[in-house]
Amino acid sequence: MTLTLTTVPCLADNYAFIIGNPATKEAAVIDVPQAAPINAAILAGGWHLTTVLLTHHHWDHIDGLDGLTNSADLHIIGAAADAHRLPALRTAVAEGDTIHVCGEDAQILDVSGHTVGHIAYHFAQSGFAFTADSLMALGCGRLFEGTPAQMWESMQKLRALPPETLICSGHEYTASNAAFALTLEPDNADLRSRVETIKTARLNSEPTVPSTLAVEQQTNPFLRADVPALKHAIGMDNADSTTVYAEIRARKDRF
Ligand code: ZN
Ligand code: FE
């Protein structure tokens, strides 16, 4: 059995995700930027929402919680490290924990960097990773709290997941991420063809999220700080990967 995945656009450029068990009709939502579109998707799918998985404390990932149709009954799961700044959790988790959601096990990864305490949820059986503002389509979140070394470590944890994993990230930032990635690796053929796909998708108002990890490995500069082709392209052949990662992140901040 694999879970179904529904991508729910929220606010200006956020995504929430609904996973559902087709046999039991049980569903969980990952992050709650805004209640109305999630309530509508739950209703349309005939789901019974039981669980909320939170990735980090930023308002655009939690503010819709109280507006969910059956908000009082929901099992809310989030990082123990962030419990003081998240809505009240029923289950507080940390890296290495396994939770059971909609009939499937999910592993918790600490992917700090954007914030310290940001977690990702990996559903190995269905092949989903909910990465929010850590690893994003062709990008990664800004470093509000963590260091480049921390985020680079997080990127490497996510990069080690099976290549067919769907990376379910928190925002539609892919078009601007693509423009930036091209400044680093203009000769990366995989990147160039992906950028064309992204342009077409956005012209048709289609989401570019989720994406597969395999595609991110080939094209996302933030996963490539130790790849010789990228290091060479930005003139840092001999630099260590943390330094290269920090340089890429700094260039993106100025882009
Ligand atoms: Zn955030
Ligand atoms: Fe966000």
Image (spheres, rainbow, N blue to C red):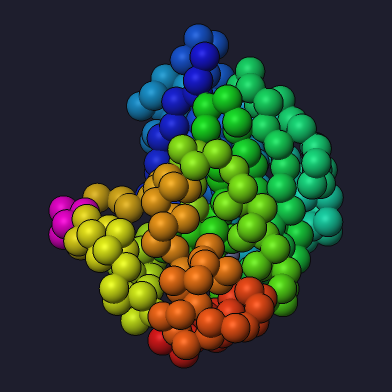
Left or right of residue 75: residue 61: left
Left or right of residue 129: residue 195: left
Q: Nearer the viewer, residue 232 or 122?
A: 232
Q: Quadrant of the C terminus?
A: bottom left
Residue at 36 percent of width and 75 percent of height = 185
Q: Quadrant of residue 241?
A: bottom right
In the depicted structure, whether residue 247 falls above or below residue 201? below
Left or right of residue 158: residue 112: right
Q: Is residue 67 visible?
A: no
Residue 204 lies in the magenta stretch: yes
Q: Nearer the viewer, residue 212 or 10?
A: 212
Residue 162 lies in the magenta stretch: no
Q: Nearer the viewer, residue 100 or 129?
A: 129
Residue at 47 percent of width and 15 percent of height = 22
| Residue 128: image location, x then y, percent | 52, 37
Q: Which residues are magenta?
A: 200-205
Q: Is residue 204 visible?
A: yes
| Residue 114: image location, x then y, percent | 64, 68
